[in-house]
Image (tube, helix red, strand yellow):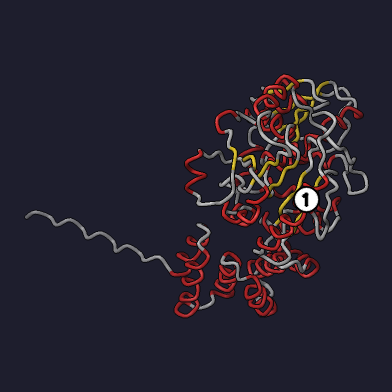
Amino acid sequence: MTPTAPKAAPRQRMSLFDAARQTLARHDGPQALALIARSLLLEGDRKGDAIAVQGACLREANCHVAALDALRAAAPRYPNNGQVQFQYAMAAHDLGFLDEAEKAFERATRLLPDRPEPHMGLADILLMGGNWPRGWEELEWRYATEEGKKILCHFDANRRWNGEPIRGKRLLVYGEQGFGDSIQFCRHIKQLRALEPRQIILGTSPELTRLFQGVEGYDVLTQNVPPSDAYDLHTPLSSLPRLLNITPDSLKMETSYITVDPANRAIWRERLAPLPRPRIGLAWQGRPTHPRNHRRSMPLLAFDRLAAHGAFINISPVRYSQADLNAAGSALKIREFGKKIKDFADTAALLSELDLVISVDTGVAHLAGALGRPLWLLLPYTPDWRWMWHRQDSPWYPTARLFRQPTPQDWATVLARVDQELTSWKARWTVPPEA
């Protein structure tokens, strides 16, 4: 008798709760919200876990007030649910209730002691509010994330620099965050010289290598992870503010701290010579893979009200063809240099020949600030911590003006103000002496 094959086990159906979480991870807020609503109805609140996901879905769908209302009500009902407390903190953070958010983040860190997210959220609040010493400490939790662990696994954990004397030592400093972070914190390398190390090795990415030739303080610049016998101690670049005890009062207000190669600048000066002055660069998009890109970036069409001010030069990290720009349907005139921009050194040379930079929160904005170029930075209502809270200037970049959303998602008011200010700026603008 021929044996019959055993029946395959029935495939377990995914719960609505798990489907909602997967959809949320794809940043599809409305669909995730619909799924978690059905989950709550049919599968229950899961001791608060489903309420936490519902709050996250409301936030993703830009229903910020509804998210805060729901999580405010849920937090006392689920005082021991760390995810509820964490999402409550995030919802309060989204709407600028920083004191409320800080207390909820504190509770979440106690309930989720091994999770980095509540600590990183707390760091954001502390740094935004000016409590930098404790904020830097909490920010170190980023190395407990999977991404952070992958970075540090390349280096000997026993030789990570933690602020001890480095006189006569070989110190490896390496960029490990986004391009903007590396550009922001490379200013601190020259401060290490006062600690009298034997050698400073700066590790960076190919995109930043030529640019960082214009940074002071290091001895060796490399794109590769050096062998372990090439250094005595190591530290991520983004940890330097903690190690050097940087506070809002001690931060040196340098107009510029990266120099541009004169030969490369001359090339870009010739390329831009036919364009009328003033020349204005525009960055409306950040790196698409950034987790907050959907909140910090705008479609090109949003800038149409600026079309009367003439042509702009594309300085977004995303390169476009002229056909792409035409297909966007915008009335804005954009000059695109495309493949001529090979790396950040070319971007720096281009920015050096511009009269004004208008940018969303992306690495190009940090570069403009590091070069001392006039910068108008367009920010979401609750921005990244480094832009702090309610300020129109920046302790990091003296030449920056900050244009903030008055309410979440309100880019229209931001651009209306830019339109008005641009008219006044152009009326006052004169050709600079170095032109």
Q: Residue at 53% of width from left, 40% of height from top? A: 320
Q: Is residue 197 left or right of residue 33?
A: right
Residue 367 visible in the displayed image:
no
- The answer to whether residue 428 is above or below residue 24 is above
Q: Which residue is mark 1?
A: 386
Q: Residue at x 86, y 37 (%)?
A: 255
Asked if residue 236 lies left or right of residue 297, the reply is right
Amino acid tagged 1: Arg
Q: Residue at x 74, y 68 (%)?
A: 104
Picture coordinates of residue 191, whole percent (x, y): 88, 32
265, 3: nearer the viewer: 265
Q: Could one spot residue 91 in this view of the protein?
A: yes
Residue lying farthest to the left in this orientation: 1
Residue 133 percent coordinates (x, y): 86, 50
Q: Which quadrant: the C terminus?
A: top right
Q: Residue 128 lies in what quarter of the image?
A: bottom right
Q: Is residue 257 above or below residue 8?
A: above
Q: Is residue 247 above or below residue 74?
A: above
Please give the count of numbered marks on the rendered protein. Answer: 1
- Expressed as whole percent of the image width and height from the top left, the position of residue 258 reads 79, 31
Residues packed near mark 1 inside 10 Å, few (<14), some (14 to 19) or many (20 plus): some
Q: Quadrant of residue 94?
A: bottom right
The residue lying toward the viewer, choosing from 406 and 337, is: 337
Quadrant of the rendering where the N terminus is positioned: bottom left
Provide the secondary structure element on which disc 1 rests. Answer: helix
* Vertical comparison of 67 with 156: above or below: below
Residue 112 or residue 346, whichever sits in front: 346
- Which is more toward the observer, 195 or 34? 34
On the image, the x and y values in percent for residue 243 come to 84, 40
